[in-house]
C-alpha cells in the first residue's frame, strides 16, 4: 500500500472524508461569436479567439459579433474553421 492509499484509508477512518465537494454544473459566460451558434466560447469549454479577417473568410461579413477586434468562437466552430483553413495553408 502506497503513501496516498494509506492517507485515504486513514482519512476515511477518522471521518474527514465525509465532506465531499458537490459538483456544480458550470455555466459559460461568453457566448460564441458566430450568430448561428448557441454554445459557449469560454476557455474551460475549449473556446478560442479568431481574427476578424479569418472569421469573415469562413462565415461572411455580419454573421458574427466581434469583441476587441477578435471573434470568440466555441470549440465546434473553431474545429470547422480549422478544417476549412487547413487546405488553404501553403508553406
Image (tube, grey):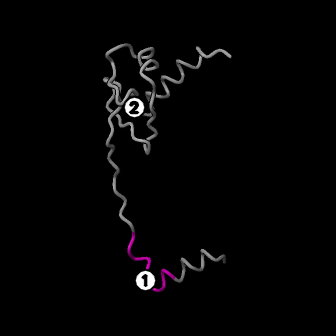
* Residue lying at the far bottom of the rendered structure: 14
Instruction: Report the span colored magenta.
Output: 11-20
Quadrant of the snapshot with the N terminus = bottom right
Q: Quadrant of residue 74?
A: top left
Secondary structure at numbered mark 2: strand
Q: Residue at x 48, y 85 (%)?
A: 13
Query: Of label 2 and label 1, which has the lower sequence position?
Result: 1
Residue 29 in percent (x, y) is at 31, 42
Element type at mark 1: loop
For the residue pair 67 and 41, the one nearer the viewer reads as 67
Q: Eyeballing the image, is 23 above or below 48? A: below
At which x and y percent is residue 71? 39, 27
**Residue picked out by circle 1:** 15
The residue labelled by disc 2 is 72
Does residue 16 belong to the magenta stretch? yes
Within 10 Å of the Cα at label 2, are there few (<14), some (14-19), or many (20+) other Cα atoms?
many
Q: Nearer the viewer, mark 2 or mark 1?
A: 2
Q: Which quadrant, please, contains the C terminus?
A: top right
Q: Is residue 24 left or right of residue 91?
A: left
**Relative side of 83 to 20, left or right:** right
User: Where does the image place residue 7, in percent across and percent down from the top left?
Assistant: 56, 79
Dominant secondary structure, magenta: helix
- Tell me the quarter of the picture where residue 70 sits: top left
Labels 2 and 1 touching (C-beta < 8 A): no
C-alpha span from label 2 to label 1: 46 Å
Image coords of residue 87 (percent x, y): 59, 15
Could you say which disc has been placed on residue 73 in the image? none
Amino acid at each position: 500500500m502506497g503513501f496516498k492509499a494509506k492517507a485515504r484509508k486513514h482519512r476515511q477512518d477518522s471521518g474527514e472524508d465525509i465532506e465531499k465537494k458537490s459538483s456544480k454544473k458550470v455555466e459559460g459566460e461568453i457566448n460564441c461569436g458566430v450568430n448561428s451558434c448557441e454554445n459557449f466560447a469560454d476557455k474551460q469549454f475549449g473556446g478560442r479567439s479568431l481574427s476578424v479577417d479569418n472569421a469573415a473568410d469562413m462565415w461572411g461579413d455580419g454573421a458574427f459579433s466581434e469583441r476587441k477586434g477578435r471573434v470568440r468562437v466555441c470549440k465546434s466552430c473553431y474545429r470547422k474553421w480549422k478544417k476549412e483553413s487547413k487546405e488553404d495553408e501553403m508553406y
